[in-house]
Image: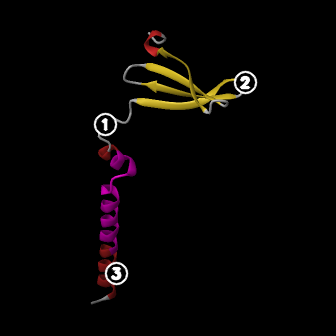
Amino acid sequence: MNKTKKITILLLVLMNLGLLGALVHNNIPSAEAQARRAAPYKTTDYVVVTGDFANNRQGLYIIDLASNRLAAWKWDISKRRLVTIGGRKLSNDFR
């Protein structure tokens, strides 16, 4: 075999290995896709956010996207538990 044929075969083998690697990489499901398949329920109905609400105190806000409701809690230091601040129906605010 001459040198040109050897180089051509080597390049074709390397190109095939690269294509095989790309094929394998694109067909491995992401962690997010695996988690969606494993969850027996819809996982996107809630948004949970923390934020300040008064006097440098942190609050926990949960939005239920299915019912368009917002609930808020704060951490009570003396009781060492979450205490409800309140809640509201967001569809009344966004018409």
Q: Position of residue 13 (x, y in %)?
A: 30, 75
- Answer above or below: position of 84 versus 1: above
Give the extent of the magenta segment.
Answer: 14-35
Secondary structure predominantly adopted by residues drawn in magenta: helix
Element on which disc 3 rests: helix
Q: Determine contact: label 1, label 3, CB under 8 Å.
A: no
Q: CA distance from mark 3 to mark 2?
A: 72 Å
Q: Position of residue 75 (x, y in %)?
A: 61, 30
Nearer the observer, disc 1 or disc 3?
Answer: 1
Are there few (<14), some (14-19), or many (20+) residues within 10 Å of tag 1?
few
Q: Earlier in the sequence, mark 1 or mark 2?
A: 1
Residue sitting at the far left: 1
Location of residue 19 by image quarter: bottom left
Q: Earlier in the sequence, mark 3 or mark 2?
A: 3
**Nearer to me, 45 or 55:** 55
Q: Position of residue 77 (x, y in %)?
A: 66, 31
Q: Amino acid at mark 1?
A: Tyr
Element on which disc 1 rests: loop
- Residue topped by disc 1: 41
- Residue topped by disc 2: 55
Q: CA distance from mark 1 to mark 3?
A: 54 Å
Q: Quadrant of the C terminus?
A: top left
Taking the spot 31% from the left edge, 62% from the top edge, the residue there is 24
Q: Is residue 46 magenta?
A: no
Location of residue 91 by image quarter: top left
Q: CA distance from mark 1 to mark 2?
A: 38 Å
Q: Amino acid at mark 2?
A: Asn
Residue sitting at the far front: 79
Taking the spot 33% from the left edge, 53% from the top edge, the residue there is 29
Q: Position of residue 32 (x, y in %)?
A: 38, 47
**Nearer to me, 17 or 82:** 82
- Residue topped by disc 3: 7
